Image: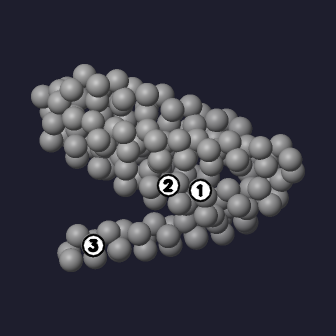
Amino acid sequence: MNAIELLKADHERVKAILTQLSESTERGVKKRTDLLNKLEMEITLHTRLEEEILYPAFKEAGSKEQDIMYYEAKEEHRTVDSLVLPDLKNTDPATPEFAGRVKVVKELLEHHIEEEESEMFPQANKLLGKAKLDELGAQMEAMKAESKKMTRAGLAA
């Protein structure tokens, strides 16, 4: 799978989790907690794939326009990873506040995904080409496999 196909598949998984989370109710505390943990795991790995593999290649191949896009995307990641997600994790899943915060996380992530898929990914396709995207995809698959192995090892410990 090339890098863009792999990231788009991740996006679909994240959107599915967000939909389930936003449709959950205050009574579904365990379900909300499980979905939130799953969302955090997906986002954390996805962010690493983008920031350590795709984004640097995209920035290097591009010009000032791609630099701006690169920094904007990284800032959106930082907003979700450092501010919004931690707030959500510290919110009681049995409250309306949790539902409100889920809505904001969903809107932020959907906006970010839409920008990547409609602007960054098509440019990356042109700038990097098939061979480079295949190579980056292989790196991403290796990182994913290593991360899953580490997660399993952590769970077994």
Q: Nearer the viewer, residue 112 or 3?
A: 112
Number of residues whose C-alpha sits closer than 10 Å to that of mark 2, classed few (under 14), some (14–19) or many (20 or more) = some
Assign a secondary structure to mark 2: helix
Query: In the rendered image, which residue does mark 2 sit on?
Result: 46
Residue 13, image quadrant:
top left
Residue at the location (36% across, 39% down)? 87
Q: Position of residue 35 (x, y in %)?
A: 27, 43
Q: Nearer the viewer, residue 82 or 70?
A: 82
Proximity of marks 1 and 2: CB atoms separated by less than 8 Å:
yes
Assign a secondary structure to mark 1: helix
Q: Is residue 22 left or right of residue 48?
A: left
Number of residues whose C-alpha sits closer than 10 Å to that of mark 3, classed few (under 14), some (14–19) or many (20 or more) = few
Q: Vertical placement of 18 versus 70: above or below? A: above
Query: Can residue 129 be seen in the rendering of this structure?
Result: no
Quarter of the rendering occupied by the N terminus: bottom right
Assign a secondary structure to mark 3: helix
Quarter of the rendering occupied by the C terminus: bottom left
Q: What amino acid is found at the position of numbered circle 3 in the picture?
A: Gly
Query: In the rendered image, which residue does mark 3 sit on?
Result: 154
Q: Vertical placement of 59 versus 116: above or below? A: below
Q: What amino acid is found at the position of numbered circle 1 in the picture?
A: Glu
Query: In the rendered image, which residue does mark 1 sit on?
Result: 50
Per the model, the C-alpha gap separating discs 1 and 2 is 6 Å
Q: Nearer the viewer, mark 3 or mark 2?
A: 3
Q: Earlier in the sequence, mark 1 or mark 3?
A: 1
Query: Can residue 49 be seen in the rendering of this structure?
Result: yes
Q: Earlier in the sequence, mark 3 or mark 2?
A: 2
Q: Is residue 10 left or right of residue 138?
A: left
Q: What amino acid is found at the position of numbered circle 2 in the picture?
A: His
Q: Is residue 46 left or right of residue 32?
A: right
